Amino acid sequence: MLRTPLAIALLIFAGNSFAAGDASKGETLFSNAKCLICHGTEAYTAPDRIINDLTALEEQVRFCDTRLNANWFDEDIHDVVAYLNQQYYKFPTPE
Ligand code: HEC
């Protein structure tokens, strides 16, 4: 039962982690990686886009990072999520 508080703490941490992303670093990472070889930025603004919140955006960035073998660290993922959100998605971010 000792695990429960830890799990909750991790959830809270994970839930807030994207707020820590640095959008300007994310922009650099994004333009240095080959993110546009499969889809252009229009995928991010398409009316039928599949991403509807920050959690889904983070998952998608992780998924695409894996396909690209960019091997981003968690911090990099969060920076790119912050950049994509600021630039395209504009989901409300937790304080
Ligand atoms: C190997 C091909 C490939 C590469 C490289 C790739 N993606 Fe993707 N990405 C996809 C596919 C397939 C989808 C599914 C939606 C689509 O077809 O547009 C997708 C969707 C996305 C979406 C969601 C679009 C939406 O519907 O809102 C995001 C965000 C995204 N990619 C980010 C990235 C980032 C960041 C990178 C660079 C690390 C990247 N992608 C590189 C294949 C790729």
Image: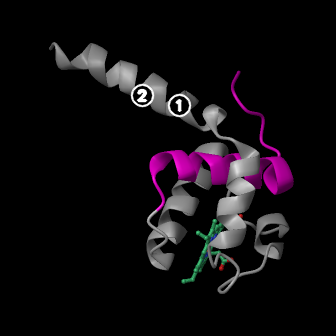
> Does residue 87 lie above or below 16 as drawn?
below
Identify the residue at image location x=76%, y=73%. 43
Left or right of residue 49, residue 7 in this image:
left
- In the structure shown, which secondary structural element does the residue marked by tag 1 occupy? helix
Q: Amino acid at mark 2?
A: Leu
Identify the residue at image location x=69%, y=26%. 94
| Label 2 sits on residue | 11
Which secondary structure is most common in the magenta stretch?
Answer: helix
Q: Nearer the viewer, residue 28 or 79?
A: 28
Tell me, yes or no, whether the highlighted magenta stretch contains residue 42: no
Are the residues tagged 1 and 2 within 8 Å (C-beta)?
yes
Q: Amino acid at mark 1?
A: Gly
Q: How many residues crowd mark 2 within 10 Å: few (<14), some (14–19), many (20+)?
A: few
User: Where does the image place residue 74, in percent across and percent down from the top left?
Assistant: 47, 48
- In the structure shown, which secondary structural element does the residue marked by tag 2 occupy? helix
Which quadrant contains ligand 1? bottom right
Quarter that holds the N terminus: top left
Identify the residue at image location x=50%, y=77%. 68
User: Where does the image place residue 3, in percent across and percent down from the top left?
Assistant: 19, 19
| Label 1 sits on residue | 15
The magenta segment is: 72-95
Distance from the alpha carbon under mark 1 to that under mark 2: 6 Å
> Does residue 92 lie above or below 88 as drawn?
above
User: Where does the image place residue 95, in percent across and percent down from the top left?
Assistant: 71, 21
Q: Nearer the viewer, residue 32 or 61?
A: 32
Left or right of residue 47, residue 70 in this image:
left
Left or right of residue 51, residue 88 in this image:
right
User: Where does the image place residue 18, in percent across and percent down from the top left?
Assistant: 60, 38
Identify the residue at image location x=65%, y=61%. 29
